[in-house]
Amino acid sequence: MRTETGQVFKLKDYKPTDFVVETIDLTFELDPTATRVVSRISLHRRDGVAADAALVFDGDELALDSLQLDGQGIDPSLFEATPHSLSVRGLPASGRFEITITTTLSPQTNTQLMGLYRTNGVYCSQCEAQGFRRITYFYDRPDVLAVYTVTIIARESETKFLLSNGNFVDGGPKDAGRHYATWFDPHPKPSYLFALVGGDLGLIEDSFTTMSGRDVALKIYVEHGKEDRAGYAMDALKRSMKWDEEVYGREYDLDIFQIVAVSDFNMGAMENKGLNVFNDKYVLADPDTATDADYANIEAIIAHEYFHNWTGNRITCRDWFQLCLKEGLTVYRDHTFSADQRSAPVKRIAEIRLLKAHQFPEDAGPLAHPVRPETYREINNFYTATVYEKGSEVVRMIRTILGPDDFRKGMDLYFERHDGDAATIEDFLACFAEASGRDLKQFALWYSQAGTPSVSVSTDWNEPKKTFKVTLEQSLAPTPGQSRKALMHIPLAYGLILPDGTEFDGQPSGNETENGVFHLTRRKQTFTFSGVPGRPVLSINRGFSAPVTVAMEQSDADLAHIARHDSDGVARWQALNEQATRHLVAASKLCRDGRNLPSAKDLAELLVATAANESLESAFRAQALALPAESDIAREIGSNIDPDSIHKAREAVLSEVARFGVAVFARLADSAPKGDYSPNAEDAGKRALAGAAMAYASIAESSPGRAKAAFDAADNMTMLSQALQVLAQSFPAAGETGEALASFKTRFSGDPLALDKWYAVQAMMPGDDTWERVEGLLESEDFDRSNPNRVRALIGGFSAGNPTGFNVASGAGYRLLAREVIDIDKRNPQLAARLLTAMRSWRSLETGRQEQARLALVSIREAGDLSPDVSDIVDRMLAG
Ligand code: TRP
Ligand code: ZN
């Protein structure tokens, strides 16, 4: 039985620990089912803490073997150990003392993948957020910073490498075929950044010379035989190290930086000090098994984890409510890194798409929470799109408001003032307020108010007077626990596009505009431009300067004007996307009501002209061709959603665009670069454009022939998986699709990461019988329920990536997910809870599906013995 306490943690209850930890010395004797852990901790009582206050450490499923104070046994009446805590009384009132704790673990049977576990025979740890307490009793909280010394002892034959944080101190042989290694990390750190790895792995090595001339050894450990797939990750690491020096003046601070790739991992990667541990999906790549998107993800995640060294590790979080302090900021940093390495507008478009697809629905549903939450039951459930992606948008807005120079000054101040601290959002904001002399009090609401603000925009053109007025009005709907909202500071970048396509460069009256940004701080504000030569078109929230929804009556002609002339590439895409979204929303509603669809000719013309425009970069043209997804349309519709009519309407529009541009698409379908594959952004953009064109051309031809030929001719995974996706999405029942799937399976059956794609592509096939296919795949022999990547590919692909298949009206999709969540929860609660969030928008479905979804959620709640992770999610989804 689980010890579910239903405890709620609150930001306002923060209190420092009673005792201060100075150093911790850990010794591990690794064994699959009986790993011995000895932890020697030196501490002192904090000033002002009562002399009779007990020391209370956290634990999770632990058993205490022995406990000592300064090397002596302790009277059993003075301590109490349970699986989840250790408390010790009668400790010295002053001065330093040492506690020694011994525990025994079974990494082999640790299926949660938190704490110390085994993956493919490799010992590996994951401690964020609260995994360290599954290793030993400790103050497992981010504001307790200690200096770690770690000794690992293990059988040499099984563990060629024994790794931990910091610098290598010494190592060598021991008795009975065992060897040992000792590591010392001079940088005080919280327990969540502790890491240990022991295993027989392949290694690739390189080095980096920092800006002050220090040499850093770089090592990436992967499964044997996969060393040649780690080169791109190594290259991305070196580029990240250089970029952080150039852009933020941040240098690496140890003699060695190591990355270990493992195959069983709950998330993307982990920034443990000096020893990052990665999901191997975000390290391993070669042209045959990884797509361009995989390469881009590797680059971004390698950078993300490396950047945490300063934003997260050297400056960490006071408590887990401050998670966005490290995550939002580090996502912002990895976004700008990728923008610098690749095409900035194309990167920004991808970010906007992702934010709207994942964060907007979260903010609009039962799981909505502020970027900095104020309460939680299970912290694992707060590693969300809101904390990460919206958290990044908030940092981006700070830069927009301050400008690049003051933003950099604020960052410098933050690094200087808080290096070595466990800090808060208030600390962070104070640096920017001070560096810029601005008041950020109202802006700080972005951290405390949940929900996506909405801005309604109206314009008024006075032809005789040549004045143009823009009126903005903000509102923010209630979210769980926040019924009343305060007015926010919303920075909206804008441009006035004149009839000839140039931009008006005059300023409006008043002082609420700066550098092309309206500062909306009151409920309603009007900005008046005078001396405007002709009726301008307003391009608003350019580059997505604020994560808000904009409501504006703007004609298709005006949108097309922006799409053609805006000097900002992102704004051009925004206008195109807005026009496409509007059309698809209208068509979906008509389709639901059984009415005829409107002609998509204007949209088709605009899309095809963009596709054919060789002065634009290929990747941008590909983004333009990618119509809003069914889930995007559903989100815009907002309520009473019928996924089938959305699918039907979108298919009809796709086909109209395809037929309109068939000649262009047929030509572009063959435009992918020939010859040796390179993952660079330019080639990737060309492949993306060719792939999008191939999809349209196939639809226009109503035949799988072109895609099947592309599949057979493909000489890299990007082209291969594009072709397979076209077959699966547009020709699910064709014989060619079956043949391609079978051939893919045979070819990649020995390669788990590539095989995940085979599962995912089938999980996402549209149709109301896909759930039966998924049931079959769940039974297939390669389906390994203990591997999170495999589970996410199949069950996550189906529930989060297949609107018609998952939302089949009978409710079979929901029942499948509920059953699997209950089953997975027994082994890996974090994974189960995350899969379940696919149902977060259930209340916006039409009533029949809503009821089926509710029944499935109730069946989970009633299953009994749920983890805190799953019960927290299911309770919040059913509340209200
Ligand atoms: N801190 C990690 C990152 O964003 C992610 C992370 C948090 C994580 N908790 C985890 C990874 C648990 C694996 C397992 O970079
Ligand atoms: Zn992170």
Image: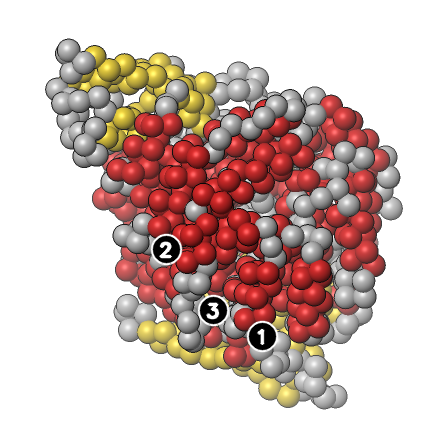
- State the image quarter where residue 495 is shown: top left
- Residue 15 % position (x, y): 56, 37
- Residue 716 % position (x, y): 52, 70
Check disc 2: other Cα within 10 Å, few if <14, some if 14-19, many if 20+: many
Q: Nearer the viewer, mark 2 or mark 3?
A: 2
The three-letter code of the residue at mark 2 reads Ser
Residue under the point 51% across and 27% down: 598
Mark earlier in primary sequence (2, 3) = 3
In the picture of the structure, the residue carrying the numbered disc 3 is: 233
- 675 is higher (above) or lower (below) than 349: below
Query: Pointer 3 and pointer 1: residues touching (CB < 8 Å)?
Result: no
In the picture of the structure, the residue carrying the numbered disc 1 is: 222
In the picture of the structure, the residue carrying the numbered disc 2 is: 618
Is 794 or 452 nearer to us in this picture? Answer: 794
- Picture disc at residue 471: none
Is there any visible trace of residue 274 in the rendered image? yes
Q: Nearer the viewer, mark 1 or mark 2?
A: 2
- Residue 333 % position (x, y): 39, 51
Residue under the point 69% across and 56% down: 734
Give the quarter of the figure containing the C terminus.
Answer: top right
* C-alpha separation, residue under disc 2 versus residue under disc 3: 25 Å
SS of the residue at dot 3? helix
* C-alpha separation, residue under disc 1 versus residue under disc 2: 34 Å
Is 875 or 713 nearer to us in this picture? Answer: 713
Is 731 or 3 nearer to us in this picture? Answer: 731
The three-letter code of the residue at mark 3 reads Ala
